[in-house]
C-alpha cells in the first residue's frame, strides 16, 4: 500500500520537490496507527526519483505518543530526474 501511495504522489506532483514528515518508533512496541516508517523504507520508496535529505529529527514525548522511543523526522525530497 505504501508503494502505491508513493507512486501516486510522484505521479500527481510530477516529481515536484516535497517535504515528507515521518514517524518512527521501536519495532514491535506498537501496532499502529500511526505506523512507524524507517529511513530504509523511505529510501526504497523514493530513491529512484528523488535525492533524499534528512533535515530534522525530533525525539517526541513518549508519554503523549505511541510506541517506544518515538521520533518525527522531516525529509526534503528533490527530484533527480
Image: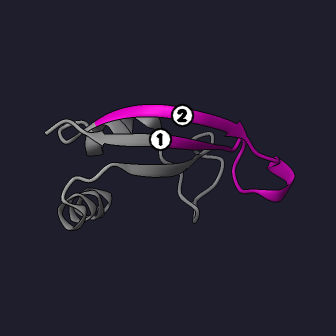
Give the position of the N terminus as an image quadrant: bottom left
Whichever of callouts 2 and 1 sits on the residue coming sooner in the sequence is: 2
* Magenta range: 51-75
Q: Is 43 above or below relative to 24? A: above
Left or right placement of residue 38 versus residue 51 in this view: right
On the image, the x and y values in percent for residue 56 come to 60, 35
The C terminus: image quadrant: top left
Instruction: Tell me which residue sits at (57%, 65%) in the image.
Output: 33
Residue 13 sits in quarter: bottom left
**Between 74 and 68, the one nearer to me in the picture:** 74
The residue shown at (57%, 42%) is: 73
Q: Residues within 10 Å of mark 1 (few under 14, many from 20)?
A: some
Task: Identify the mark at residue 75; answer none if there is no mark.
Answer: 1
Q: Nearer the viewer, residue 40 or 81?
A: 81
Residue visible at 58% across and 62% down in the picture: 34
Q: Is residue 72 magenta?
A: yes
Query: Image quadrant of residue 49?
Result: top left
Which is nearer the eye, 10 or 31?
A: 10
Label pair 2/1, CB-CB below 8 angstroms: yes
Disc 2/disc 1 C-alpha distance (Å): 5 Å
Q: Position of residue 54 (x, y in %)?
A: 49, 32
Q: Position of residue 30 (x, y in %)?
A: 64, 54
- In the drawing, what numbered circle is on residue 55? 2
Amino acid at each position: 500500500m505504501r508503494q502505491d501511495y508513493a507512486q501516486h504522489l510522484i505521479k500527481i506532483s510530477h516529481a515536484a520537490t516535497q517535504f515528507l514528515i515521518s514517524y518512527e518508533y521501536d519495532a514491535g512496541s506498537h501496532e499502529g496507527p500511526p505506523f512507524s516508517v524507517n529511513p530504509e523504507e523511505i529510501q526504497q520508496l523514493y530513491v529512484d526519483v528523488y535525492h533524499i535529505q534528512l533535515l530534522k529529527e525530533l525525539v517526541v514525548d513518549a508519554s503523549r505518543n505511541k510506541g517506544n522511543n518515538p521520533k518525527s523526522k522531516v525529509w526534503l525530497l528533490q527530484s533527480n530526474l
